[in-house]
Amino acid sequence: MEERLGLILRSGLLAPLDPEVAGVHGSKPNFSIVESGPSPRSVRFRPNDPANPGWGLTPTHLKKHFFGGKPTALQRIDPGGTDDKWALHLAELIHSPATGTTSNGMLDIIKSFPRADGSGTFKMGVRLAPKPDGTFDLITV
């Protein structure tokens, strides 16, 4: 599952997927999530920024935030969830209005999502760095 989510997030254009259709669309190394909605954003999931080499969905972030064994990993928070479902949550987050802004201008976006087993909800969030060209770099999930 970890390799598949990494492939989904790294290898193509993740378009506005409805819950019935999840997967990879297209193939661009720095892809955009494209959606009509309140805040469509072009986001680099693996920014090539020497000043911030830890930003983005690195293998370390995928393990820590999605597939790790700690209580803060999605596979522990939402054990019935799938990589497809989490990719959809990520796509929804990226296009949602910011819920906060850091002192240095980074956008925080946090939303609640239903647990796959129906036992309640959990919160998931992203931090994005705005770039001068109007795009964003993913800092972390």
Image (cartoon, rainbow, N blue to C red):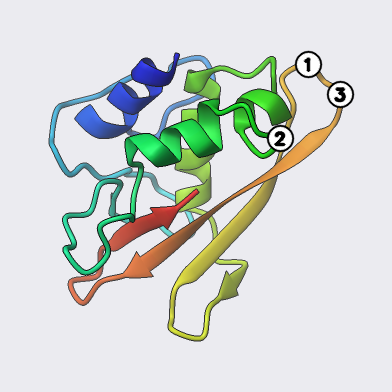
Q: Report the front residue among 67 and 39.
A: 67
Q: Report the front residue among 16 and 98.
A: 98
Give the mark nearest the N terminus, 1 or 2: 2
Residue under label 1, please give it.
117
Amino acid beneath label 2: Pro
Residue displayed at 30% across by 62% down? 136
* Quarter-of-image position of residue 106: bottom left
Q: Residue 119 carries which label?
A: 3
Question: Residue 56: in sight, yes or no?
Answer: yes
**Mark 3 to mark 1: distance in Å?**
6 Å
Residue under label 2, please give it.
71
Which one is in front in this view, the residue at disc 3 or the one at disc 2?
2
**On the rendered structure, is 30 left or right of 126?**
left
Residue 88 in percent (x, y) is at 49, 31
Relative height, residue 137 to residue 19 (above, below): below
Residue displayed at 25% across by 57% down? 53
Q: Judging from the image, what secondary structure is the residue with disc 3 in? A: loop
Relative height, residue 92 to residue 137 (above, below): above
Residue 135 in percent (x, y) is at 25, 63
Amino acid beneath label 3: Ser
Residue displayed at 67% across by 39% down? 72
Residue 122 in percent (x, y) is at 75, 39
**Contact (Cβ within 8 Å) of mark 3 with mark 1:** yes
Question: Residue 12: in sight, yes or no?
Answer: no
Residue displayed at 16% across by 63% down? 50
